[in-house]
Image (spheres, rainbow, N blue to C red):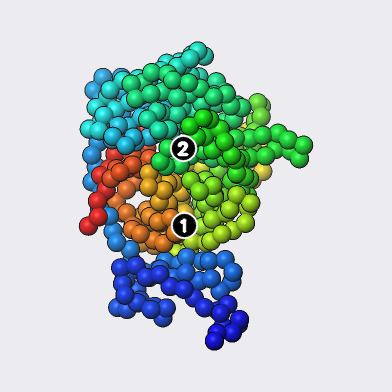
Amino acid sequence: MIGSAQRSGLTACIVALATVGCGGARGGDSELHVEVDSSRGIPIVRSSGVAPEWRTEIIAAIGVDETGELEFGSVRSVLLSRLGRLFVADLSLTRVSEFDSLGSFVRHIGRKGSGPGEYLSPYSIATFHDSIALFDPYGSRISLFDVSGKWARQWTVAMNTGGQAVRLYRAPPDEFWAYATRINSSGVERVFVRYVGDGPRDTVSAHATAAVRPSGVTCVVPRGISFYPDPFGGRSMAVPLPSGEVALATSTEYRIAILAPSGDTTRIIERPVEPARVSDEDWQAEEALWREWRDRIVDEKCDRDQLRRPARHPIIEWLVLDDQSRLWVATRTTAGRVYDVFDTSGALAATVAGLPPVGGVDPSIAGDRIALVVEDSIGRETIRVYHIRPR
């Protein structure tokens, strides 16, 4: 019989791609070893070693044409459909565009305005059954467009704009969450609102999106405050899951907590990695951008005049779900930039290399494709679509 002290110290092991025991992977660190440690009450899913690598090849680069008519202004959201169609929400040009699976332009969906089928600020898009959901915060609504691009219906929402957290979050297969800010008796409440077939349903707390305040330099300017974010500073990231849980991470450590709707931690995902060092080249490039910004407001009062140089880059750069509810974690370590793919249990399933970093716009992953917004060599925004396949 196992005593209580022994039982609490037991470690359950899940081994992927290698036949190993709780003592570790055979053949050294080159094999993937997934271990679930429940000794402290909360399961910690820890993946170490080398995961299967998925290859990528570019299918299309969209946003550069000879006429310039299909160039983008400021892309705020991209979406791949199940059929391989690509939808792009361009905030500064106030339009939503559709492209086919080869990257050829199909049509613009809706138009600028305040009526049905129109929008003032195409901010974020998500799939919703056979429709496309468009978040229009200035218009205070979420609109649905069917597969032919025709307006179907809309829901009224509170105006809410701001940073990267303010967007629609895809919850495959046929739901999405919307970030919202509410005012109640206790103050400001940040929540994720789930949308199902008949509209908004339950909510979960999104207060953790502000748990780590962005660091940087704040300057008082004639019309308000101007803020320069620290390019190497830590920040919080939160993604609602189809289960109603929330995946929460801080960029400076590879530790992702899965929170129940009650706020309790149900499990933790960890991966032992070495963060990349901030090289002289990295620092000089960022410092040049900072100095260019600072010189434009030379006469204004700022809380400091220098950026702080850290020793290492943040490890986690982005969290996003694919259409199978797997969690993709964009990382930067001594091994370079890769995307780690975790299954719904929290076990590492694969690593994807060869993709550009996330530039501040949520990637879209559907089937064997991923779409990302990147800048080309002259600073134009383009969208690259890649095919992903196992080696």
Categorize mark 1 by other alpha carbons within 10 Å: few (<14), some (14-19), many (20+): many
Drawn side of residue 388 relative to residue 231, left or right: left
Residue at image location 55% in from the left, 43% down from the top: 229
Q: Nearer the viewer, residue 297 or 217?
A: 217
The image quadrant where one finds the N terminus is: bottom right
Q: Secondary structure at mark 1?
A: loop
Residue at image location 53% in from the left, 66% down from the top: 43
Q: x, y (%) of residue 30?
A: 31, 71
Q: x, y (%) of residue 161?
A: 57, 31
The residue tagged 1 is: 315
Q: Earlier along the polypeptide chain: callout 2 or callout 1?
A: 2
Where 88 falls versus 28 (above or below)? Answer: above
In this rendering, which labeled residue sits more in front, label 2 or label 1? 2
Residue at image location 32% in from the left, 54% down from the top: 352
Q: Amino acid at mark 2?
A: Glu
Identify the mark at residue 175; answer none if there is no mark.
2
Residue at the outermost front position? 1
Residue at the outermost right position? 185
Residue 291 visible in the shown view = no
Q: CA distance from mark 2 to mark 1?
A: 30 Å
The quadrant in which residue 156 appears is top right
Q: How many marks?
A: 2
